[in-house]
Amino acid sequence: MSDLSVESWGAGDPVILVHGALATGAEEWQAQEPLAREGYQLLVPDRRGYGNSPEAKGEDFLRDADDIADLIGDGAHLVAHSYGGLGAMLAAARRPGSVRSLALLEPPAFTMITHPDAARLVERVRGIWDEDLSDREWLRRFFEAVGTDPASLPPEVLENLAPMVPIARRSRPAWTFETPINELAAARFPKLVVSGAHSPGFDAICDELAEQIHATRAEVAGAGHEIQFTGDPINHLLLDLWHGGAGAR
């Protein structure tokens, strides 16, 4: 039984929404709340170290995988953003018979770096971890690395995120993640990989990941790395995926 803090929206087929770094579940998935009126129970956990979930020294996709596998229960759809996608992929590979579908929004599958644009993205992100930066400067550089202009964010957003920086800085690095390609490719549940059409590096990673795990590939522009904030465009793709459609238009 998971000890995570989990909000539940709606009733029906369960969907687990896994947030990324520097966020809590309810904050990151607010634009998906209308999907709870479509016959789905949205389970919105705070990953370990965030929100009201137990404290953690840093993010850890291995521990996330344990937590997500527990939440899947008898069966659930999985939707995961950014760092949350790493744990979701491991959990789905571990429990393929219980996963109804898997949607990944710009997961940092940084070991998939055959494309030069992907390699440059990984180099930028790794460089932040190697520098002695204040938390505020680290936050600014992190946003720039993943393709979000920090100047486009209201100042209060940066203030609210600053306390979360230490857990992100102490994360198990994404470039040590070994993508479970064979297990996901063999899984029979439908898969969708989405990028935000803002970063050639993430586009290249998503292209390769989708090809290797036999997933539908889509782009949803308008919110940069925070694809879920687009609301209706990504929500329509998710509904199509959950209904057994192709997943992309």
Image: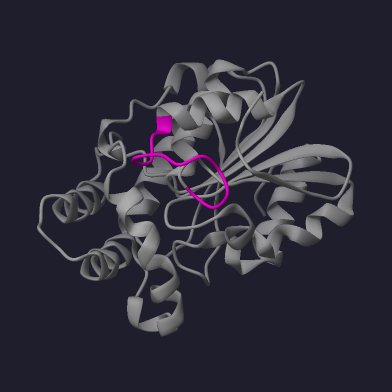
- Name which residue lies at 63% across and 24% down: 70
Q: Is residue 201 above or below residue 205?
A: below
Exactly how many numbered labels are in the figure? 0
Tell me if 76 is positioned left or right of 95 in this view: right
Q: Position of residue 245 (x, y in %)?
A: 76, 41
Is residue 66 highlighted in magenta? no
Tell me if 57 is positioned left or right of 124 in this view: right
- Name which residue lies at 68% across and 27% down: 72
Q: Position of residue 33 (x, y in %)?
A: 75, 59
Residue 115 in which image quadrant: top left
Residue 147 in which image quadrant: bottom left
Q: Can I make out residue 6 in this image?
A: yes
Residue 136 in which image quadrant: bottom left
Q: Can I make out residue 245 in this image?
A: no
- Name which residue lies at 54% across and 55% down: 24
Q: Main secondary structure of the magenta part?
A: loop
- Name which residue lies at 58% across and 30% down: 68
Q: Quadrant of the C terminus?
A: bottom right
The stretch of residues the image draws in magenta is 50-61
